[in-house]
Amino acid sequence: KHAKIHFTSEGFNHLMFKGKAERSRKDQITKFQLIEYAPEIIGLTTTIQETDVKRLNVSMRSHGKNTRGMADVYYWAFVAIIRGKKVKVVVRRIEHGPILFWSVIPGWVTSKALGHKVVSKAKGDLDAD
């Protein structure tokens, strides 16, 4: 059985910003073009390809109020090749909260340079994005 993944403004904001720094327009456009694949990948995949847990200072809701504090943050990544594109989808959970969509990352981008196919591979670290 698949867990329910929530698509919230927090995940969409992460597509535009990394921390407080705005991502490049090119990165933002790429991520927003790939987001259409996220629900399908999450719904179809049965294997978690990457996991990570970090103790971070994060915003959270506690007793109906927004607070900041240290919490365990769990990350899971799913990778799939869909319609010729390799895409990684990252979800995260703060402590025992809901599982949220966090990011979508291209696995590779192909282009033609001087008649040759050029493959550029993306980083595989969950937190590299």
Image: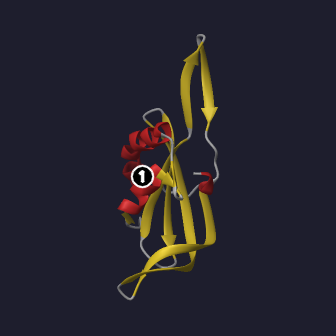
Q: Residues within 10 Å of mark 1 (few under 14, many from 20)?
A: few
Query: Under tag 1, what secondary structure?
Result: helix
Q: Position of residue 42 (x, y in %)?
A: 43, 55
Closer-to-camera residue (10/109): 10
Q: Amino acid at mark 1?
A: Leu
Q: Residue at x 40, y 55 (%)?
A: 12
Q: Position of residue 4 (x, y in %)?
A: 37, 67
Report the coloring of the rendering: secondary structure
Q: Position of residue 85 (x, y in %)?
A: 48, 35
Total labels drawn = 1
Relative to 95, does residue 9 appear above or below in the rendering? above
42 left or right of 72?
left
Relative to 14, does residue 36 appear above or below in the rendering? above
Closer-to-camera residue (19/49): 19
Relative to 47, does residue 68 appear above or below in the rendering? below
Q: Residue at x 52, y 78 (%)?
A: 95
Q: Quadrant of residue 63?
A: bottom left
Residue labelled with disc 1: 44
Q: Quadrant of residue 33?
A: top left
Q: Residue at x 55, y 64 (%)?
A: 75
Residue furthest front in the image = 21
Q: Position of residue 1 (x, y in %)?
A: 41, 66
Residue furthest top in the image = 115
Closer-to-camera residue (13/39): 13
Closer-to-camera residue (41/27): 27
Relative to 63, does residue 117 appear above or below in the rendering? above
Q: Residue at x 57, y 35 (%)?
A: 108
